[in-house]
């Protein structure tokens, strides 16, 4: 099963991601389950739910063969915990999907750290290619990534200061 998640935000949906994954669900043989939160699009080719208790939510990670998500620390940590490959796509402020561009900044940090279990795409239209590549081979995943500590540090700095460090280990 491919698990798609957009997080628990109650203000901003991620319609572009859900629409793109719904089209992919129509074309792949593996079932897809989507956690859509407040997204104002109803998937037509995949099962979906809006929110779930944490234990149920984590069960979906455990059962998934692949996870597709918004670009946030939660999905990265959960994918590592359950040893699942992850495709992340940042929500965009300029498209009304967030209050700022922190996911775009975070995506660049994740990409720079070359975390083996995480593939960053910047547009939902790029996800299909990544899913096809995943379905066609079983990649060797690097779950013992040193970059996670740097990303957690960058996230803590962002929460405390409201800025993203652009030099040193976070750049």
Image (cartoon, rainbow, N blue to C red):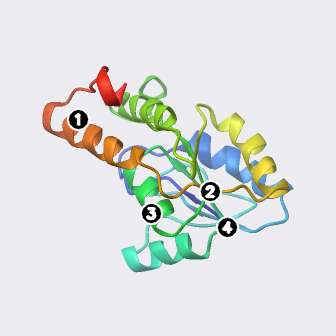
Closer to the chain start, of discs 1 and 2, is: 2
Q: Nearer the viewer, mark 2 or mark 4?
A: 2
Q: How dense is the environment of label 1, judged by Cα within 10 Å: few (below 14), some, or many (20 and up)?
A: some
Residue 7 visible, this angle: no
Spot occupied by residue 29 in the image (x, y as percentages of width and height): 85, 65
Q: Position of residue 102 (x, y in %)?
A: 35, 32
Circle 4 residue: 65
Q: Nearer the viewer, residue 168 or 126?
A: 168
Q: Is residue 89 left or right of residue 124?
A: left
Query: Which mark is drawn over residue 158?
Result: 1
Rendered position, 93 above or below 89: above
Q: Is residue 63 above or below residue 23?
A: below
User: Residue 147 occupies which quadrant of the picture?
Assistant: top left
Q: Nearer the viewer, residue 142 or 135?
A: 142
Q: CA distance from mark 1 to mark 4?
A: 31 Å
Quarter containing the C terminus: top left
Q: Quadrant of the N terminus?
A: bottom right
| Residue sitting at x 48%, y 31% | 112
């Amino acid at each position: 099963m491919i698990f798609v998640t957009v997080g628990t935000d109650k203000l901003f949906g991620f319609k572009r991601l859900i629409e793109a994954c719904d089209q992919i669900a129509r074309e792949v043989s593996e079932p897809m389950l989507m956690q859509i939160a407040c997204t104002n699009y109803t998937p037509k080719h995949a099962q979906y739910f809006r929110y779930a208790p944490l234990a149920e939510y984590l069960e979906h990670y455990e059962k998934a063969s692949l996870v597709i998500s918004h670009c946030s620390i939660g999905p990265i940590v959960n994918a590592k915990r359950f040893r699942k490959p992850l495709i992340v796509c940042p929500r965009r402020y300029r498209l009304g999907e967030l209050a700022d561009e922190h996911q775009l900044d975070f995506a660049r940090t994740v990409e720079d750290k070359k975390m083996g279990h995480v593939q960053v795409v910047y547009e939902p239209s790029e996800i299909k290619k990544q899913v096809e590549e995943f379905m066609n081979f079983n990649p060797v995943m690097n779950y013992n990534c040193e970059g996670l500590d740097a990303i957690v540090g960058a996230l803590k700095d962002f929460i405390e200061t409201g800025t993203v460090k652009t030099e040193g280990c976070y750049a």
